[in-house]
Amino acid sequence: MKTPNKHLKGIITRCTNYKESDRIFTLISDDGIMKFIARGAKKPSSKLSGHIEPLNYVALYYRPSKSLNSVSQVESIHSFLEIKKEYNLILKAQYMMELAESLFSENDDNSSILSLLINTLRNIHNSKIPTLDILIFEFELLKHQGFGISIFDCTNCDKELERSDHYFSSNVGGFYCTTCFESKRLLDQSVKVTVGQQLILRTIARKNYKDLISLNLSEKEISNCRKLIQNSIRDIIGVQLKTVKFSDL
Amino acid sequence: MTSGKNSLPVEVQKLIIAFSSLPGIGPKTAQRLSYFVLSQNKEETLKLAEALKEVKENLGYCKTCCFITSDKDSENCGYCYEKESEQICVVENVIDAITIEMSGIHKGSFHVLHGAISPMNGIGPEKLKVEELMKRLNRGETKEIILATNPTLEGEATGMYLNKIISENYKNIKLTRLARGLASGTDLEYSDFNTLSNAFQNRTSID
Ligand SMILES: [Zn+2]
Ligand SMILES: [Zn+2]
């Protein structure tokens, strides 16, 4: 008896050609990161062909298999054409897909990763400062996956941080108050973060995205905040993502 | 129980593994091919071995158009020597150039990038033969660049990148790209003549 077809929705993150006319692709979905084979998809006549491309949000039917799941039907829900028209946005989108992949965990509930990714991809082409969208994406993604950065209190003594420059440690994923920093002297592992940068992160943490616009942020300020988060990401996943250098950091 | 394959002489095992690295060849076919080689006369087999060796040892890339050539030390290869570089068709790989050349649609020369921009695989423009293309354009002979990268996300990204740097640095060069007659998600290599021909005829300006 044949196994029944299963249905799944997700974003295609990677594609490679296989044999004469097949394509193997990776899908990030609520059910996890899965690999599929689309037989004959490279042929122009194939019904699958136009749909199997990275950065497509698709609905598909597949037959579960012990080796590679084979798809029987794939349809695009959203192709993010506005992103695909702009070189810089493509690079940013690829970075977000790689980041989402790398923070996916086998055992936890990952449902928010996909919706966060889709939402950011849907809106980034309308954004005045796309790097700000990426910063928010990075921040939220870390939080969802249990690596949230503590912004308001000292990560060592829990005391509320007063308004001044503080030191951020990517190791512990948070800030030290002045006293703790003095006693710990963790200069080598910590970076100084200005009041301005802290304000950006606090505003994001409070989800006051509208207020971010009125802050009149410069690319430089956003980039500095992203560097902090980037250090945390590197500490969490243990490697540097391949797409980072293409994402305007 | 011992597996039959492991009791084979190491030489045969190595041959089977080598055959399985080829596209479209699974373990079964690799075994069949290996047994065929065993039954083949020595001269025939050595001819094949020699051809494989020569292709890797003697071939290099043309300094100008980056197509494969056996004349590594000369500035031009047979592929670009006789063709004028007034019109250069930029493709991702050698097979794409051959496919277009065989169709007879394009009379100008080619430039092979040897890949496409692919951030997820760590491939940026610096890993492609972009600098070589710029060197060609610096000679001032080129009037038109036809961007014939694949209509895939990576191919399109590569086209956009080239469009940007060429239009910024070479104001007098006309930039075109193949019309979207080609289905997205497929490779040039597999397109039929009609599709390819239409795509060439209907190429559009990039503005
Ligand atoms: Zn403290
Ligand atoms: Zn040449």
Image (spheres, helix red, strand yellow):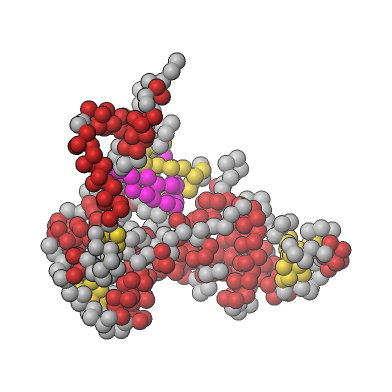
Residue at (17% x, 74% y) in the render: B84
On the question of residue A214 being in view, the answer is: no
Residue at (30% x, 52% y) in the render: B56
State whether residue B12 is above or below residue B60: above
Occupied quadrant, residue B110: bottom left
Which quadrant is home to the C terminus of chain B? bottom left
> How many numbered discs?
0
Q: Is residue A58 left or right of residue A49?
A: right
- Spot occupied by residue A186 in the image (x, y as percentages of width and height): 79, 63
For residue B5: magenta? no
Say which of B95 and A247 sits in front.
B95
State whether residue B25 is above or below residue B165: above
Occupied quadrant, residue A24: top left
- Spot occupied by residue A96 in the image (x, y as percentages of width and height): 51, 59
- Spot occupied by residue B3 in the image (x, y as percentages of width and height): 41, 20
State whether residue A85 is above or below residue A105: below
- Give the residue furthest to the front: B43
Residue at (29% x, 78% y) in the render: B137
- Give the residue furthest to the left: B104
On the question of residue A137 being in view, the answer is: yes
Q: Is residue B32 left or right of residue B164?
A: left
- Spot occupied by residue A97 in the image (x, y as percentages of width and height): 49, 56
For residue A13: magenta? yes
Which quadrant is home to the N terminus of chain B? top left
- Give the residue furthest to the bottom: B172
Q: Is residue B199 left or right of residue A190?
A: left
Residue at (55% x, 51% y) in the render: A102
Magenta: predominant secondary structure element? strand
**Range covered by the magenta-colored residues:** A7-27
